[in-house]
Image (cartoon, helix red, strand yellow):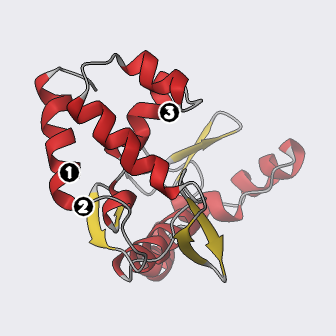
Amino acid sequence: MGCKKCGHESEDNRMKHSTSLCVICYQFAPDNQQDFKGYINEKADSKHLETFRKYFVSSGEKQKQAMIKKAIKGGLMSRAPFGYKIENKKLVHAENHKEIEEIFEEFLHENTSLRKIAEKHKLSVNGLKKVLKNFTYIGKVKFNNQIYEGEHRSIVSSTLFNHVQNKLEKLGIK
């Protein structure tokens, strides 16, 4: 699909006011529809925008790259999960951190439903599943489908975590 302003052909074109624009023309396009009409009528040569295209990185891509760097360093990627708290921008064990190991042990060794375990620990079933699958509890950081070594202390052992993952898989729990 070609850009209505410069004619650049790309699959990455975006729509504004029902008009196809390349990412460069889109960045400069005014939001006001009247101004937009004037903007579109001022044609640009696609060749003159190639330098911009070559070095253009969307703000979303910049943010993602920064988050990947943070994850590689083991940094905190979101709010503190159950059993942790944030002190000085670092994840540390919260007062209730022993409850996490309890949850893992109960799931692995007791023949109890997820619902009963969730109720006992005042969690939803989905909340419980998130706890059981959360790599944070073994000192890791998961971001963008990659797992990195975290800079925080684990709450459960990798062995316990892996046994729980195997049981979840065996039971078909997603």
Query: Which quarter of the picture shows residue 174?
Result: top left
Q: Where is residue 42 in the image (x, y as percent from the top left)?
A: 71, 60
Q: Position of residue 13 (x, y in %)?
A: 47, 49
Q: Is mark 3 on a helix, strand or loop?
A: helix
Given residues 21 and 56, the one toward you in this image is 56
Q: Is residue 11 visible to the viewer in this orientation of the structure?
A: no
For the point 28% across and 71% down, which residue is it? 148
Q: Position of residue 26 (x, y in %)?
A: 62, 57
Pointer 1 local density, CA inside 10 Å: few below 14, some 14–19, many at least 20: some
Q: Count of labels shown?
A: 3
Q: What element carries label 2?
A: loop
Given residues 44 and 88, the one toward you in this image is 88
Question: Would you name the residue on which mark 3 appears?
Answer: 127
Q: Which amino acid does label 1 sit on?
A: Leu
Question: Which is in the foreground here, disc 3 or disc 2?
Answer: 2
Q: What element carries label 1?
A: helix
39 sits left or right of 131 in the view: right
63 sits left or right of 54 in the view: right
Q: Which badge, 3 or 1, comes first in the chain's sequence?
A: 3
Question: Would you name the residue on which mark 1 appears?
Answer: 160
Question: Are the two marked residues, 2 and 1, in contact with CB atoms closer than 8 angstroms?
Answer: yes
